[in-house]
Amino acid sequence: RRALDALGAKCAERGVEVRFMANGMARRRLNTTTHHRKRDELFWRCEWAFHVGDARVVRVDDKVSENVTLADVYAAHVKALTIETEDKATVAAFKPTDADENKTTNDGENNANASASTYVALLEQFDTPANAKRWHAVSLQQTLAQALRGKVVVEFPTFHVVPTLRADAFVLASP
């Protein structure tokens, strides 16, 4: 339990509230998030849920540095997803475009080019009723640490990637 408390404290230092589930729960057992004490760096388990048609394809990274850009991790998953999928047209909406790479300013905020993207990356906001979920829009140009700052995470983050055409079904949280 001490190691879990120490991990929670390091996350809190970075502005991330992590809620740990009880031992034995599936999400608790899957969590591989660690803190490297010598480098003072967090390595997160991240899930990427791609909403493809009516299905949800989940891809997992067991160890992602908090200093890596989400775009780098995302691109690797889209490439693998494209190779694995027989119907390439369903995955085409998730491919990064030039507009995606230029859609943020230096401070990580979206600018006017954001509407050119064919997908939206979202992170669930917790402490909301199950029938009124809210979502945080996440810029893939941010590092993992920047994307998680000020958020609540249960064990580890799950990023939902949704085609822009279906994004209106997800109610965004107030900034």
Image (cartoon, helix red, strand yellow):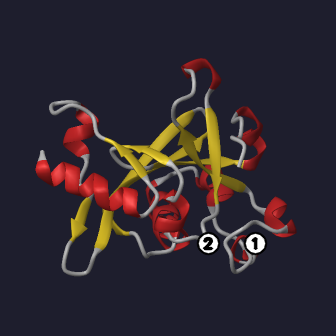
Would residue 99 appear left or right of 162 to someone viewing this image?
right
Q: Is residue 110 visible?
A: yes
Residue occupying image coordinates x 53% and y 66%: 146
Instruction: Determine which residue is flagged by label 1.
Output: 103
Is 98 located above or below residue 77 in the figure?
Answer: below
Residue occupying image coordinates x 65% and y 58%: 92
Horizontal and vertical percent position of residue 75: 52, 69
Viewer-nearest residue: 102 or 35: 35
Would residue 147 appear left or right of 84 to someone viewing this image?
right
Horizontal and vertical percent position of residue 137: 66, 51
Residue occupying image coordinates x 20% and y 73%: 37
Instruction: Determine which residue is flagged by label 2.
Output: 141
Q: Is residue 79 visible?
A: no
Would residue 163 appear left or right of 47 to someone viewing this image?
right
Q: CA distance from mark 1 to mark 2?
A: 8 Å
Tell me which amino acid carries mark 1: Lys
| Quadrant for the N terminus in the image | top left
Horizontal and vertical percent position of residue 55: 53, 35
Disc 2 residue crowd, few under 14, some 14–19, many 20+, Cα 10 Å: many
Tag 1 and tag 2, C-beta contact below 8 Å: yes
Residue occupying image coordinates x 15% and y 31%: 24
Would residue 128 appear left or right of 98 to someone viewing this image?
left
Secondary structure of the residue carrying numbered label 1: loop
Viewer-nearest residue: 80 or 158: 158
Q: Residue furthest top?
A: 131
Secondary structure of the residue carrying numbered label 2: loop
